[in-house]
Amino acid sequence: MHVEATTDSPLATGADTVVIGVFDGEGIPHDVGERTLGSLVESGEARTKLGRLAVTHAEGRRFVLVGLGDRSEFDAERARIAAAAAHGRAREIATDTLCWEVPHHVGDAVVAGLVEGTLLHAYRFDRYKHNDDDGDIGRLLVSAHHDVSGPVRWAAIVTDAQNRARDLANTPANDLTPSRLADYAAGLERFSGLTVTALDETAIRAAGMGAFAAVAQGSEQPARLIRLEYEGPGAAADAPRPAFIGKAVTFDSGGLSLKPAAKMHEMKFDMAGGAAVIEAIAAIAELQAPVRVLGIVGATENLPSGSAIKPGDIVTAMDGTTVEINNTDAEGRLVLADCISYARRQGCDRMIDLATLTGGIVVALGSVYAGLMSNDEPWAARVEAAAQASGELVWRLPLHADYADMLKGRYAQLTNLTERREASSITGAEFLHHFAGEIPWAHLDIAGTAFDVHRRYIAGKAATGFGVRLLVDLATRSTS
């Protein structure tokens, strides 16, 4: 969908469908006026409750009236919900060009939310559904009395990146192998300032990444460590360079600690963290943000075979830590451990990793919040601020030495999974904390938010692209 801002009135844009939001207790601020559209509100056909819809025709156009609720409560998230509702109705009535009239006296975040809600709701993954095209809206115009091209462009670029991350996660594992993910990332060098390289499995082993390599050894598909470096225009050479680190297990069977069959098909989503990192950095580069960012993505499969890692094996991570493998299905932390060590060696000054790491976070937080754990208060506060601004919510869980002690190995320094069935999300984070050391670091466990979520602007049970908006906001806030 092509998106653009305009200062033309909705009637002057040529759009065939115009969306107008209605707040509680307020009239309809539109040139067509109360006489034509206000009667819908007066009759009760159009309601001001958030997301309620009514459709009418006037001035040769279709008008969709959407309830916005109480103005004092209207924010970017509610804008996404209202926009998704309007998009759904506009799509049903065969709209070609949709024009949103921006409500008066709202900020840039709400303008961006209207774009985000529309594009996220419009997303469909139909690559494998031949001759299943039921059409969609071709253009979205955002009309305001003042210039809103900045937030509209920003939202369009970032949401397109989020939808690309959804494409990556939705793609089946037979088509998106680790090497193909690396090839895809390399194609993003079309954005100025972005450089992408990849270490093959031989180089991964030569670098001493024994934990990462151990996960990869059960698959015939070779692993890749994908490195993305963005140097934005005007960014000082000594400007902070955060590292965004993503788990990209393109299929996770659990290895020899095999997962139950019933939900195993969902394990193509185990690379959602890596997809978010790749596309967030692509969006930052397309925006030409004046920042520096390092991206590290560990891509592999986790499969059982005669060469697969076995419970009881001991591996040596890149930093020399020995790890006893208690469960081969706790593989993501092994991949991330070496990715974190690699990022540290590249000279990053702060880190955040995203991973579908534990089922425990789903039990704790469901699909509303991702779990946040961090060793640094200022960095955690920045992550929380970015989460709030982007609408990709996080809830902080504690780290504690007693949780870290639960990971001490019987035969090695660490075990990859404690034998105690408690605090699984926190102990998984404490495992990663060992490798992060004292560098400001945050961990986002996105297992509950990466797919099959309940959002009014996310349709279906597929991938969400969670983390893209958060990371873009975090990078642009990290200029000092």
Image: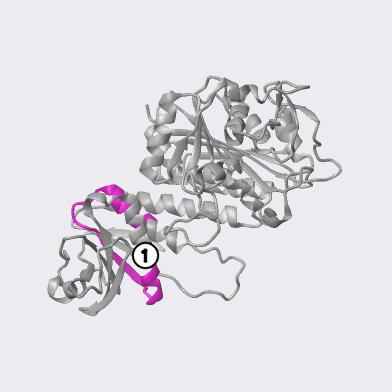
* Residue 177 visible, this angle: yes
> Taking 9 as reference, is 212 left or right?
right
Residue positioned most to the front: 421
Q: Quadrant of residue 100?
A: bottom left
Mark 1 Cα-neighbour bin, 10 Å: few <14, some 14–19, many ≥20: many
Residue 41, percent from left and from top:
20, 71
Residue 43, percent from left and from top:
20, 75
In this rendering, the answer to whether 173 lies above or below 227 is below
* 99 within the magenta span: yes
Q: Amino acid at mark 1?
A: Ala
Q: Quadrant of the N terminus?
A: bottom left
Q: Secondary structure at mark 1?
A: helix
Q: Nearer the viewer, residue 209 or 35?
A: 35
In this rendering, the answer to whether 250 lies above or below 40 is above
Q: Quadrant of residue 23?
A: bottom left
* 323 within the magenta span: no
Residue positioned most to the right: 306
Q: Measuring 49% from the left and 36% from the top, which residue is drawn there?
A: 230
Q: Measuring 44% from the left and 30% from the top, which residue is drawn there?
A: 380
Residue 424, percent from left and from top:
61, 35
Residue 59, percent from left and from top:
20, 78
* Residue 239 visible, this angle: no
Magenta stretch in the rendered image: 88-116
Q: Quadrant of residue 314?
A: top right
Q: Measuring 45% from the left and 43% from the top, which residue is drawn there?
A: 285
Residue on which disc 1 sits: 85
In this rendering, the answer to whether 430 lies above or below 6 is above
Q: Nearer the viewer, residue 95 or 66?
A: 66
Q: Quadrant of the C terminus?
A: top left
In this rendering, the answer to whether 442 lies above or below 355 is above
> Taking 114 as reference, is 275 left or right?
right
Q: Nearer the viewer, residue 198 or 432?
A: 432
